[in-house]
Amino acid sequence: MKALRAGILPSYLALCLLLGGSSASNWGNLVLQLLAIPLGFWALATKAPAQLTSSGRALILLLCLLLLLIGLQLAPLPPGLWTHFPGRRDVAAAYDLMGQLLPWLPVSLAPDQSLASSMWLLPPTAILLGILKLGADRRTLLIWLLIGVTLAAILLGTLQVISGSRWYPYEVTNYGAMTGFFANANHMATLLLASTPFVAALYVRARRQSSSAQKSSALMMISAIAPVFLAIGLIINNSLAGLGLMLPVAGASLLMVWWGKRAISRWWLFLLAVMGAASTAFVFSAPLGNDLTQASSATYQITRYYAWPRTFEAAIDFAPLGTGLGTFANVYPRYEDPVFVEMTYMNHVHNDYLELALETGLPGLVLIAVFLSWWTRRTLSIWRDADSGGVFAKAATIASAAILTHSLVDYPLRMAAISAVFALCCGLMASPATRRASSRRGFEEAKAVHLSAD
């Protein structure tokens, strides 16, 4: 029974990585959402082996506030109230044109889409609750599983590039590119970036804790070879954001290996921040031929250069309450220039923060700011305090930073696979030190008391 319990969370994480590579509604995402419900309730009902930290309680509180926001967006409101909300004049005019009485309507302009979008929170919520409530006994197994699936995705992606149109798990995908278990090559790059610091963390763990020289050599050899595959994968993947973020992620990972358990100085943290900012600026630079600072004439209407200003305009029009979670595809066509409208369309704005500003308004932006404040304070604590979280927590800060940065130009967190990895990172950042470390400190304290008594 204990082995079964210990294997549930890793098994579910593996399913998320294998089946959650698309933002479309498909059977894989449905399975993940359905399985997340009993897993979440099981985590809540199980007595935690260790007391929740203040960081863990803060994360759960933020999650509850997010659920409250979604509930408020779906709550029906009387016509005398919702008609005064910004952007609702056209909705009221449509009912008047049809000669119908104004009904009770929620804040969300498409409640069915908001409800469907809220279901995407189930997998990462289950992962987060599982890590916070079920203990840290299987942290290493979770990390090895993440690395293993990532390496398998690289092998699959290599076959995809060689074959050209075979071995792709999704019909709508980037044919000819390395997508692995994803529908989009950019999201495969996110997984490669997020896995890199955990390989370094495994190397550090193997160097410290291996019980035999043979086992230590094997683990360190694997930890040394894996980064080579990850780097090759990023190069073959050829994602602009992936290549831009590769340098700061690799630099932070090497710093973690070099610095070890010592607390890092603020100057090194400042250097990492500058490196990350420079890489972000590199991605935004015009000479790279991206669609952020210039637009291709062939696909002008689906470029970020075209979509971001229009989404920002829509967010201003519907502020401060927003249009409702998951309503971007319903609202955005109202702001397109009819001259450039073709058969292709924007399903996401390719900037999670801008899209959430439109959909959740000021309350959503406040929650994002609070979370980023938590993440920043926790990251500084982990890197500046040698006993705060351990090496996996340091790796989690690097991986989550890569995901948060990539969200500036894409929508990785709308993939169940990436959101599960992000929840894993947040759980590791909020969890206490491993039981082994705690036991060692307890043993040393008891030994000191015994010696003083003698």
Image (cartoon, rainbow, N blue to C red):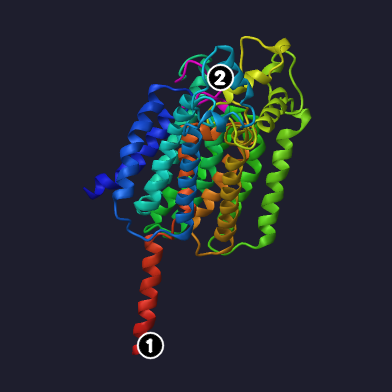
**Secondary-structure class at tag 2:** loop
Point out the image quarter for the C terminus: bottom left
- Give whichever of 194, 309 is nearer the camera: 309
Question: Percent x, y for residue 427?
Answer: 45, 50
Kindly give the residue lying farthest to the right in the view shown: 287
- Give whichever of 353, 366 is nearer the camera: 366
Q: Residue at x 42, y 54 (%)?
A: 216
Q: Residue at x 64, y 31 (%)?
A: 86
Instruction: Calculate the distance from the C-alpha at mark 2 to the C-alpha at mark 1.
Output: 67 Å
* Residue 233, image quadrant: top right
Question: Percent x, y for residue 433?
Answer: 43, 60
The dot on residue 89 is none
Q: Residue at x 66, y 31 (%)?
A: 315
Amino acid type, label 2: Asn
Residue that badge 2 annotates: 174
Residue that badge 1 annotates: 452
- Give whichever of 75, 171 is nearer the camera: 75
Sequence-first tag of 2 and 1? 2
Q: Residue at x 47, y 51 (%)?
A: 61
Kindly give the residue lying farthest to the left in the view shown: 1
Direction from residue 243 to residue 439 in the image, left or right? left
Amino acid type, label 1: Ser
